[in-house]
Image (tube, rainbow, N blue to C red):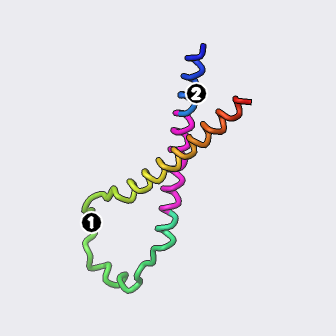
């Protein structure tokens, strides 16, 4: 029976980590997009030259570095939340 309690504790820890990681990652990505959108200032002088540009856009390639930073940040915060949850949960059952 003691093994079942330990397994439930491990499962709860993984659930807390997974849910907090996914939630924090989505929130960080959303705020990142909002911040980039707010800080973007288009240059109106380039609009006159836009008719001379080709109509097809060619992307060079994806940049994964900003997403990796958001991923790492979300991982650290989720790890801390899991540790905090584990500490609170273990203290509440000691009484």
Labels 1, 2: front one: 2
In this view, the residue farthest toward the right is 95
Q: Residue furthest front?
A: 94
| Rendering coords of residue 69 (x, y %) | 41, 56
In the rendered image of this protein, does residue 75 appear above or below residue 89?
below
Residue 49, compared with residue 1, is above or below; it is below
Q: Earlier in the sequence, mark 1 or mark 2?
A: 2
Task: Write the start and end of the magenta stretch as one range.
Answer: 14-33
Residue 85 versus residue 38: which sits nearer the camera?
85
Q: Position of residue 74 (x, y in %)?
A: 49, 50
In the rendered view of the protein, which quadrant contains the C terminus? top right
Residue at horizontal 55%, vertical 33%?
A: 13
Magenta span: helix, strand or loop, mainly?
A: helix
Q: Where on the picture, by quarter, is residue 15?
A: top right
Label 2: which secondary element: helix
Picture quadrant of residue 87: top right
Q: Nearer the viewer, residue 40 or 28?
A: 28
- Is residue 17 found inside the magenta-colored segment of the image? yes
Picture quadrant of residue 40: bottom left
Q: Is residue 94 left or right of residue 26?
A: right
Residue 72: image tag: none
Distance between the Cα atoms at labels 1 and 2?
A: 55 Å
Name above or below for residue 48 compared with residue 35.
Answer: below
Mark 1: give few (<14), some (14-19) or many (20+) Cα within 10 Å: few
For image coordinates 66% across by 38% down, the residue present is 88
Residue beneath the point at 38% across and 86% down: 45
| Image coordinates for residue 19, horizontal then vertical, percent | 55, 40
Residue 35, position as x, y percentages in the image: 50, 67
Circle 1 sits on which residue? 56
Location of mark 2 (residue):
9
- Per the image, label 1 sits on a secondary structure element best described as loop
């Amino acid at each position: 029976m003691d093994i079942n309690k330990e397994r439930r504790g491990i499962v709860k820890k993984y659930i807390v980590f997974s849910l907090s990681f996914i939630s924090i990652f989505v929130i960080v990505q959303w705020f990142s997009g909002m911040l980039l959108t707010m800080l973007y200032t288009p240059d109106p002088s380039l609009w006159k030259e836009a008719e001379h540009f080709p109509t097809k856009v060619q992307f060079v390639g994806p940049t994964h570095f900003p997403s990796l930073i958001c991923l790492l940040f979300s991982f650290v915060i989720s790890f801390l939340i899991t540790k905090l949850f584990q500490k609170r949960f273990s203290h509440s059952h000691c009484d």
